Amino acid sequence: MRSLATTRRDVLKACLTAPWLAEAATPSRVIIARQPMVRTATGKPDSARVLNALDRALAACFSADSAAEAWRQVVRPGETVGLKVNCLAGRGASTRVALVEAICERLQQAGVPQRKIIIWDRLNSDLESAGFRIESRPERIRCLGNDALGYTSELAVYGQAGSLLSRAVTELCDVVINLPVLKDHGIAGVTLALKNAFGAIHNPNKYHINCGDPYVADVNMLEPIRRKVRLHICDAIVAQYEGGPSYMPQWAWPANALLVSRDPVALDFTGWRIIEEKRAEKGMPSLKDAHREPAYIATAADAAHRLGTNDPRRIQRVEV
Amino acid sequence: MSQLDSGGHFVQEAKFYEKLPHKKIKCKLCPRECVIDDRERGYCGARENRGGTYYTLVHSRVAIAHVDPIEKKPFFHFLPGSMAFSLATAGCNVNCKMCQNWEISQVRPEQVPAAYLPPDAAATAAKQEGCRAIAYTYSEPVIFAEYVLDTAEAGHTAGVRSVVVTGGYIQQEPLKKLCQRVDAIKVDLKGFTQKFYTEVVNGELKPVLDGLVTMRKLGMWTEIVYLVLPTLNDSDAEFQGAARWVRNELGLDVPLHFTRFHPEYLLKNLPITPLKTLERAKAIGDAEGLHYVYIGNVPGHPAENTYCPHCRRVVVERTGFLITGTHLHNGKCAYCQQKIAGVWL
């Protein structure tokens, strides 16, 4: 049976409008900004060092002379920016507040006023458990869950995915910066840039079957997720190679890095490799042998999705 | 065991699950057997792992409650002409692309308004509304099984019976528990191939069939609905397969309703089911010898009536959900005294 909801017209349209396609000739760049001693003796991230890593990563990602110049390529004047954090796992394995504060600082320096920045995830309680403070005053940087922001009433459909979308991504934000965490996922293999989009839909529980394939890719094709997510900054200050998405300290390690890319597939492929390397180092089976290889990453790169590349020959891994 | 969580939502430890190492759990309610990490939910969205303990989030959390004719469920052979106090929580353990109630079945509990209606209050409300039964319906009662069990018990104490309207995608142990507490079950047999269940339902056919056999073995009054979707489950082979299976495994007296589909949810591209298709399905069911084959969602069609399997005269006349005439006496045909299978007033 053909896909029930995707027409050839949808696929053609997706192919012609995919931002990645316009740059098909150039490799997708994944920046790995390492920052030793990024955490203080107490284990908390050092704000100055986080900011330093972020600046180096942004400048390298956009081949810019400065981070400020890079940010101006991410956000245009007047746009409202959504910061999609990943807060399911509490303070241990969620997007760190220090990273989000650093991004907010640079956005403001790039001319984005506080009232045009929204930090969001699924639930207010998730945000709070990760250390964020709920803020709904419109003149401030807002920080809210979908339970407060609400969802659209009309289904968005692509392939096997049919979901209501968070108003954060449909109505409130013009551009989304995706802020996942580098970690293992007990069902989907890994949860990185692509899977973080599950925080924008009302029914993520329906899309974990078959290791999330093709659902993760299909969700990323939903308008406006595909159109509005412009940049992916993966928090790998502390990463986790097993036991995710919950925080399991016995399987976490200080990777002391940020992964930054405009291509979510390339970022996911790179992050997946890093997790596999760590698993091998620790004597654990590969995710394929653990029956949870994240096949959705390849699906996201296929002809029906074209969300980015998973071809290592076309991924430029840059360490800064 | 129950508690109000920080959001004010009613939460209770689930009955059917197994604890695993590292705070994981395996759900044993439906055949999907979700293995769920801490702070995650199962496929149904209505159950959550909190620190290695699994909770239902929908006990007494009623997203919709309504008084319906029992024919709307549809039950045609169970207390016909009576009213059913019908209720549902959010959530479902499948994701049928033709779902008629997806706004409550395919959402998480906190995404829809809900009222707190504990079992005793549900039973009292049913009684006050003059209902002879509480119907667990609209979404999927399997995922709120604990609430069904408790409410059915409260209902029996109050003299109100309980009926379940389900896709039947449930493990044997919880099903047997349900059968001990409720009085009738209507199963949506959504198709008769695993291909259909994989592609349209996101579930499995075999556990549904196994469950139907268990229900009959346990003496449960059971009716079956087969929603006919143009091009997807409307072949002669599927109709015949379903009807023959019912005849061989459940018996001639189990009512089989072939009902009309209206475009909804993810299948808005399909037309409504042509009447000829439904009549073809009924003819196949009749040819297999089933005693009670109906056409549903076609108000005024003669195949809404119940016919005596012996003398073939009409014993219950219906138009839509309305009973317009009965020719039964003590559960027997008023004309030939043939026993008509069912639970009668």
Image (cartoon, coloured by chain):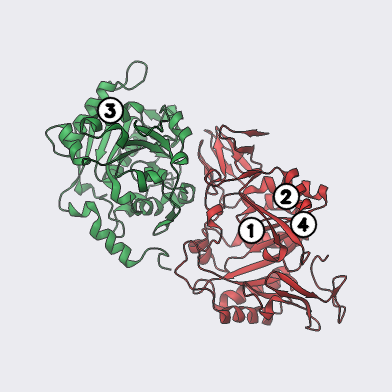
**Which residue type carries mark 3?**
Ala
Residue A102 disc label:
3
What's the distance in space between the residues labelled 2 and 3, CA to CA?
55 Å
Q: Nearer the viewer, residue B211 or A8?
A: A8
Residue A286, can we see it?
no
- Residue ranking furthest to the top: A41
**Which residue type carries mark 4?**
Cys
Residue B32, can we see it?
yes
* Quadrant where the C terminus of chain A is found in the figure: top left
Quadrant of residue A18 within the rendered picture = bottom left
Q: Which secondary structure lies at badge 4?
A: loop
Q: Which secondary structure lies at badge 3?
A: helix
* Chain B on-screen colour: red
Residue drawn at 55 percent across, 56 percent down: B94
What's the distance in space between the residues labelled 1 and 2, CA to CA?
14 Å
**Which residue type carries mark 2?**
Lys
Q: Position of residue A266 (x, y in %)?
A: 26, 45
Residue that badge 4 annotates = B131
- Count numbered badges in the picture: 4
Q: Earlier in the sequence, mark 1 or mark 2?
A: 1
Q: Earlier in the sequence, mark 2 or mark 4?
A: 4
Q: Position of residue A91 (x, y in %)?
A: 42, 27
| Disc 4: host chain | B
What's the distance in space between the residues labelled 4 and 3, CA to CA?
61 Å
* Quadrant where the N terminus of chain A is found in the figure: bottom left
